[in-house]
Image (cartoon, helix red, strand yellow):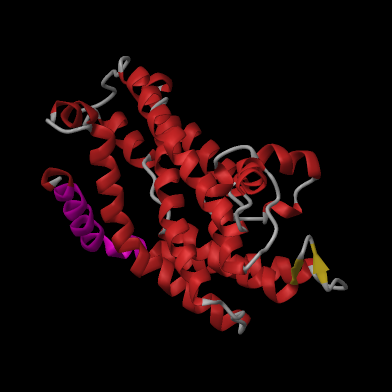
Amino acid sequence: MRHYLAFSSIAIKEGLAFRINLFTSLFGGFFRLILLISVWKAIYIGHSRLAGYGKEEILFYMVIATAMSAGGLLSVGSILGDRNDSGDIVIDLTRPVSLPWSYFFSSLGDFGVKFWIKSVPTLLIGLIIIRHIPPIAGSQFIWFLLLFVGGSFLHFWLNLALASFTFRTKSSYGLNILWGSGTAFLTGLIVPISFYPGIFQDIILWTPFPSVAYTPLRVLMGESVVMGGLAEIYQKLFHLPVTGSLVIEQFSWILLVLPMAFRIYQWNERVVEVQGG
């Protein structure tokens, strides 16, 4: 464990050393937040509620979602791609540690920096702009935090599974674009999944992506209906409350995705070729 924590420490130091890049991207996050708030305000002109959300609720949802995506989700796509392109991946593979876990702890350290420099300011500025904080019970907030941690963990391993195909494609650019655009919609970070057409919504709910962000956000918002997927099955079989069903659903996806991601990574690692260095 000590060896892996060293990767977190290095990532924190690198993040603080190049914090000007974080501050620069922070302003980009502010622009994205203002744009999303403006778009949703325009959508709600003439409407009191859409897809179960009132105007103030959807604005609060978007502030939290934007703060989460600003720096709160663990990922590995850009790291793995850069290391492979430069040839430094060979150095990483010779270390006496598991490369996926070393990247995980490195991402954890990166999160420690981005959370305070990007996520927290984005959250505060967003709440000032919308001037609305709904009543949130203490239990809701605690479950949100736990599900947020679990969702970030799940996000990393899903990302690793796709990012490892960089070893075969020889370039991470297309994979990173696919991941960024795809997960923004599949996780509910851009649009709540309840806004999607019925059949599309049903398909997404049977994937692990809603458990990354949409599940924590739903719990924080106090939503009382399980829409589908594994959570609906758990609720019917064990007569669980909504939050309990969603928690078990997320845990189930973690148990499934973690070994799957390792297998996919190991399969792709066999064809590693040095492009640079």
Q: Residue at x 61, y 68 (%)?
A: 221
Q: Would you place residue 3 above or below residue 86 in this image?
A: below
Is residue 22 located in the magenta-colored stretch of the structure? yes
Q: Quadrant of residue 181?
A: top right
Q: For this view, does 117 lie left or right of residue 38? A: left
Q: Quadrant of the C terminus?
A: top left
Depth check, front residue: 236 or 75:
236
Q: Could you tell me residue 262's position as x and y percent?
A: 35, 28
User: Where is residue 166 shown, x and y percent of the image?
Assistant: 40, 27
Vertical comparison of 15 with 117: above or below: above
Residue pictured at 56% horizontal, 43% vertical: 209
Instruction: Tell me the chief SS of the magenta region.
Output: helix
Seen in the picture, residue 39 relative to 156 is either above or below; the reply is below
Report the front residue among 18 and 261.
Answer: 261
Residue 267 in the magenta stretch? The answer is no
Residue 86: image quadrant is top left
The answer to whether residue 250 is visible is yes
Residue at screen point 80% across, 64% down: 50
Query: In the image, which residues are magenta?
Result: 5-23
Does any portion of residue 172 appear in the rendered image?
no
On the rendered image, what quadrant is the N terminus found in? top left
Measured from the top left, where is residue 232 in percent x and y?
66, 46
Along the line of sight, which residue is nearer the eye, 105 or 170? 105
Residue positioned most to the right: 46
* Residue 117 shown left or right of residue 51 in the figure: left
Pinpoint residue 116: horizontal percent, then vertical percent: 34, 69
* Figure quadrant of residue 135: bottom right
- Residue 160, compared with residue 224, is above or below; it is above
| Residue with the most extreme top position | 271
